[in-house]
Amino acid sequence: MGLSYTGRFAPSPTGLLHAGSLVAALASWLDARGHNGQWLVRIEDVDTTRCVPGADQAILQQLAAFGLVADGPVMWQSHCNAAYQGALDTLVKKGWAYPCGCSRKDIETAIASAQAPSVARHQAAVYPGTCREGLKGKPARAWRLDVQAVQTALGLPVITHWTDRRLGPQQQKVAEEVGDFVLRRADGLWAYQLAVVVDDAAQGVSHVVRGQDLTDNTGRQILLQRALALPTPQYLHTPLVLGANGEKLSKQNGALALDLQQPFQALNAAAHALGLPRLPENTTIDQALTHWTALHAQTLGTVFASEA
């Protein structure tokens, strides 16, 4: 397949990588190597309010300790403001993005008055479209995508369908389940959804391999790709590493940084989480990566389909 395959790992420098991060990094690296493609790294530092100084370089050092080195220059989202602005300008010009003057309290009040169904834990409320027809005297705060306007103008179905390489057929009614989502935040920072779509296209990413917790972002990103006339990568969402409380291991719930004193042990555990065999302790990292790459290539990635 050669360089027609381009994958990426895109950590946020809000802290150091932990066991869950390593599973995602290893999965994306192995998938690129198994397809004779290239593997890129992108530092997703667009949310500057949460970034930890020096974490970006520390993350690159962590990856190098596990033998995971990018095949090209590392991209920093903080260097891409002009590209994001260009994408927003395109959407505004087409009438597919609009300014929103609603505060979080405004949205909660509007939802309550409409007697909308309660929101599940960890799930954002669906924006009711209050500012779609104009600000009505309120100052602009954020910018949102007019989901229905995009679908109507491009003749897209109400339900966005895609096939995940591990999870199988997926679908999402973006207008109903998400609503008109934010492209630029009220604090002036770029929203993740817009940044990741622009970045994947700029880097020529053909295959996205990332954690299963990001699956529900895919429908929004495909819709944005359609709106901006950008290609849609193939998606594969990997099993999550869970903490002792049964929730996803993350920086927010106190996940410990990877121990670089014993990198092989951490890499072995990450491979096992992906359904790959654990290797003997005297195996070098290079030997391990070579072995797992060969297994992945032989099975065309189906090892990732098994739950650990």
Image (cartoon, rainbow, N blue to C red):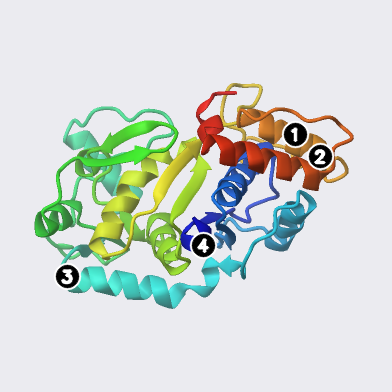
**Mark 2 vs 1: CB contact within 8 A:** yes
Of the two numbered discs 2 and 4 on the same chain, state the one appearing first in sequence.
4
Mark sitting on residue 264: 2
The residues tagged by marks 3 and 4 sit, at their Cα atoms, a distance apart of 34 Å
Marker disc for residue 268: 1
**Which residue in the protein does label 4 denote?**
3
The image position of residue 143, as x and y in percent, is 29, 63
Judged by depth in the image, the label closer to the viewer, 4 or 1, is: 4
Q: Which residue is mark 3?
A: 94
Q: Give the residue type that dot 3 points to.
A: Lys
Label 1 sits on what residue type? Answer: Asn
Residue density around tag 2, few if under 14, some if 14–19, many if 20 or more, within 10 Å: many
Examine the rendered structure and indicate whether residue 136 appears above or below residue 108: below
Question: Is residue 280 in view from this perspective?
Answer: yes
Q: Residue at x 86, y 40 (%)?
A: 262
Q: Tag 2: residue type?
A: Phe
Task: State the image coordinates of residue 87 (x, y, percent, origin top left).
Answer: 32, 70
**Which quadrant holds residue 195?**
bottom left
Residue at 15 percent across and 43 percent down: it is 158
Say above or below: 289 vs 4: above
